[in-house]
Image (spheres, coloured by chain):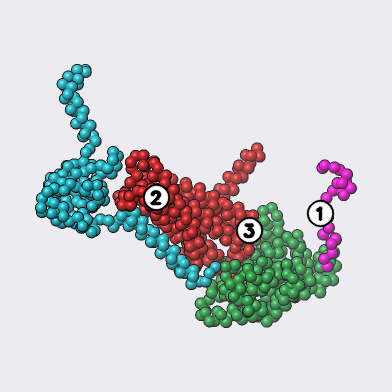
Chain colours: A green, B red, C cyan
């Protein structure tokens, strides 16, 4: 198992060093090092409850770590003032797990929202830009619908159009495949890869869907128990010699992560009566 | 011992919430200043807190005025003072019931809706995603709602009071036979614009508007982002607003009209 | 939510309604505009106005024909100067009309009651009523009553007690 973040990429956009974060007494990250290469799709995977969403919030500056640093393009983001952080975030897109569309606004207005808030563009130009973004996710025809009228997959695609409205350099996807039917999952997989390559963005995908994440990622990190357990290209991890990695990558029910929650011996428990 | 521990926990929890609520007021007021440059956002919210509260305020105002006239008449007529009915109805409404009942109705109709809406936006990560888009949710989402509610409540209280006085007229003059001229002239002789109407309807409901909307938006922003958490916050908005309005009403009445 | 135009119109109506209500409260309820206005002014001197207030009614034969518009102390005579406005349609009141300050019911409001005289000339704007009777002040009446009782008793009762 490699024991430090891999330096094999020439240019690193996001650099995480010694990140520690805990909620109350529960330690979520206990010294994590990550390098996110520029222009690639990096997937961060791990079992449910390992704090993958928390990691994205730490990278986006919404949460503050107890120790360690997060640098984006060489800027330590937790040293920034609120306005500097906001300026930096204009270059970051984020796709939330639920899509997080503004329920009071139509599809068109949702995508136009970042443009209206951050630019002084004339209405005709905003219209053109919004239609271009919607076209790229295939929903130009749905622009007058309200979020409540969209299916889950469509909502996520609209949210994706909104996330790329300002042409960010970095885009983060929080569990983009969860709860999607096979068709919209396929659409999302294709879109993430396509947008990354066509727009020259850097993508971070947080997921526990091994097959989909492995199919689009250039590089994978596996996180468990607050540590980076393994990292490498999908092909490298596929033939890793760690039992844990093997169990996770192939979805085996029993292995280093036991099927049973810790319990006293089965026979004792059954015969022990009211205990 | 368990009860004591629970009491302590309850107290700490509430003191902590009070602290968070007070700390929330500063960014809220900063946001309000920012929103003044974008009145369009406020107009949309005025629709949901003001226009949509209008039916309940109109109907309640009418019935409260009618009941006041009926009860007032039955008492006054024993003293041969039924002509003072207008004064009784108007002073009760202008000084107390107008601002107080309007604020209570507002808490139930608009305050709870504000809390639920903001709580839901938090639960569905809309506030979070706004923050990631480098937009401050307090000044973009919360401040317009707060400002709209703050402006709407005095207007609702004035409408409630006016409709109540007309309702009193309907019963007093239309059904119980109080003289039309006496109803208005006795009222005009006793109700003063500065002391009663400005103090009662305007100042009181501005104060209530500040408190009711502050509680409503804070509870939404502070809600635990689950269905149950939003439900609890909504309940807290109605309960806390009602208590705050009634308590403040006593303080304001003592300050304005003396007697304590 | 309805279209933006509808929202704007509805909010406009709401705000207008709110201000109209406030306006009604100001004018109709507190009667802020009812000073002076339509009618002609008449003055009268009273020794004591009792509980008479500005905007108290002025009536004749039980019918309200005007309002008190100002009450002040006459700087020369040191009595009360009451100014009232009588409605224009009652423009034929005789000059020797008398004014009394009366109370409606035992505990009710005080008002000015006018009683027409027999002269041919009529009151004009700015006329002064000559014949007036002050308000009954309860303390004075009780005082007079006690005094007359004491007088009836032959003046023996009071000094008899040490």
Q: Residue at x 63, y 79 (%)?
A: A141
Which chain is home to disc 1? A
> Bounds of the magenta span?
A250-275
Indicate the secondary structure of the residue bearing disc 2.
helix
Tell which tag, 1 or 2, sits nearer the viewer.
Answer: 2
Mark 1 is surrounded, within 10 Å at the Cα level, by few (under 14), some (14 to 19) or many (20 or more) other residues, namely: few
Residue matched to label 1: A261
Q: Is residue A1 above or below residue C62?
A: below
Q: Nearer the viewer, residue C20 or A47?
A: C20
The image quadrant of residue C149 is top left
Which chain is home to disc 3? B
> In 3D space, how far apart are the residues under numbered discs 3 and 1 (Cα atoms)?
28 Å
Where residue C46 sits in the image (x, y, percent)? 17, 44
Q: Nearer the viewer, residue A275 or A4?
A: A275
On the rendered image, what quadrant is the N terminus of chain A found in? Answer: bottom right
Q: Does the residue at mark 3 contact the one at mark 1 (Cβ under 8 Å)? A: no
Q: Is residue B2 left or right of residue C122?
A: right
Where residue A75 sits in the image (x, y, percent)? 61, 70
Q: Which mark is residue B175?
A: 2
Q: Residue at x 25, y 44 (%)?
A: C110
Residue matched to label 3: B225
Q: Are marks 1 and 2 on the same chain?
A: no
């Amino acid at each position: 198992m490699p024991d430090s973040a891999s330096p094999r990429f020439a240019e690193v956009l996001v650099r995480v060093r010694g990140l520690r974060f805990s909620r109350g007494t529960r330690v979520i990250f206990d010294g994590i090092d990550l390098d996110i290469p520029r222009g690639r799709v990096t997937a961060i995977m791990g079992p449910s409850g390992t704090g993958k969403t928390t990691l994205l919030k730490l990278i986006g500056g919404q949460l503050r770590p107890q120790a360690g640093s997060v640098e984006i393009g060489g800027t330590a983001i937790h040293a920034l003032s609120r306005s500097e952080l906001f300026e930096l975030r204009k270059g970051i897109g984020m796709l939330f797990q639920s899509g997080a569309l503004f329920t009071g606004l139509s599809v068109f207005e949702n995508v136009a929202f970042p443009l209206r808030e951050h630019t002084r563009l004339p209405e005709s130009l905003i219209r053109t830009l919004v239609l271009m973004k919607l076209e790229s996710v295939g929903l130009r025809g749905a622009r007058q619908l309200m979020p409540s009228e969209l299916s889950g997959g469509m909502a996520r695609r609209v949210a994706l159009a909104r996330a790329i409205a300002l042409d960010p350099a970095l885009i983060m996807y929080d569990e983009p495949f969860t709860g999607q039917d096979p068709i919209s999952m396929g659409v999302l997989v294709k879109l993430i890869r396509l947008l990354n390559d066509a727009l020259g963005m850097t993508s971070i995908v947080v997921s526990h869907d091994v097959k989909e994440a492995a199919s689009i990622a250039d590089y994978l990190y596996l996180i468990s128990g607050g540590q980076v357990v393994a990292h490498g290209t999908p092909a490298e991890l596929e033939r890793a010699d760690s039992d844990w990695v093997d169990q996770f990558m192939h979805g085996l029910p029993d292995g280093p992560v036991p099927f049973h929650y810790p319990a006293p011996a089965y026979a004792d428990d059954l015969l022990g009566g009211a205990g | 011992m368990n009860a004591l521990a629970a009491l302590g926990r309850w107290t700490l929890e509430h003191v902590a919430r009070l602290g968070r609520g007070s700390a929330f007021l500063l960014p809220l007021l900063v946001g309000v200043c920012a929103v003044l440059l974008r009145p369009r956002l406020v107009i949309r919210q005025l629709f949901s807190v003001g226009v949509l509260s209008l039916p309940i305020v109109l109907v309640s105002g009418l019935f409260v005025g009618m009941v006041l006239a009926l009860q007032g008449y039955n008492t006054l007529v024993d003293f041969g003072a039924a002509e003072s009915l207008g004064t009784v109805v108007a002073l009760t409404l202008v000084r107390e019931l107008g601002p107080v009942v309007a604020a209570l109705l507002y808490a139930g109709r608009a305050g709870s809706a504000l809390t639920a809406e903001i709580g839901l936006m938090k639960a569905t990560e809309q506030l979070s995603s706004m923050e990631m888009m480098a937009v401050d949710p307090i000044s973009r989402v919360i401040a317009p709602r707060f400002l709209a509610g703050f402006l709407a409540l005095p207007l609702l209280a004035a409408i409630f009071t006016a409709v109540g006085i007309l309702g009193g007229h309907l019963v007093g003059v239309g059904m119980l036979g109080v003289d039309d001229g006496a109803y208005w002239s006795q009222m005009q002789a006793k109700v003063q614009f500065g002391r009663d109407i400005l103090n009662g309807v305007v100042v009181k409901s501005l104060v209530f508007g500040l408190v009711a909307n502050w509680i409503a938006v804070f509870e939404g922003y502070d809600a635990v982002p689950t269905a149950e958490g939003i439900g609890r916050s909504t309940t807290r908005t109605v309960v806390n607003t009602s208590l705050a309005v009634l308590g403040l009403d006593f303080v304001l009445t003592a300050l304005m009209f003396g007697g304590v | 939510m309805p279209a933006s135009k509808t929202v704007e119109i509805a909010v406009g109506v709401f705000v207008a309604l709110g201000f109209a209500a406030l306006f009604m409260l100001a004018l109709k309820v507190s009667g802020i505009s009812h000073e002076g206005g339509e009618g002609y002014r008449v003055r009268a001197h009273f020794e004591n106005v009792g509980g008479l207030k500005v905007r108290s009614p002025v009536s004749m034969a039980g019918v309200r024909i005007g309002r008190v518009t100002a009450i002040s102390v006459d700087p020369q005579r040191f009595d009360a100067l009451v100014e009232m406005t009588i409605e224009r349609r009652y423009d034929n009141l005789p000059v020797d009309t008398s004014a009394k300050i009366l109370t409606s019911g035992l505990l009710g409001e005080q008002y000015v009651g006018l009683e027409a005289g027999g002269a041919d000339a009529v009151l004009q704007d700015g006329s002064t009523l000559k014949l007036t009777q002050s308000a009954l002040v309860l303390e004075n009446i009780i005082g007079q009553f006690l005094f007359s009782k004491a007088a009836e008793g032959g003046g023996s009762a009071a000094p008899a007690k040490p």
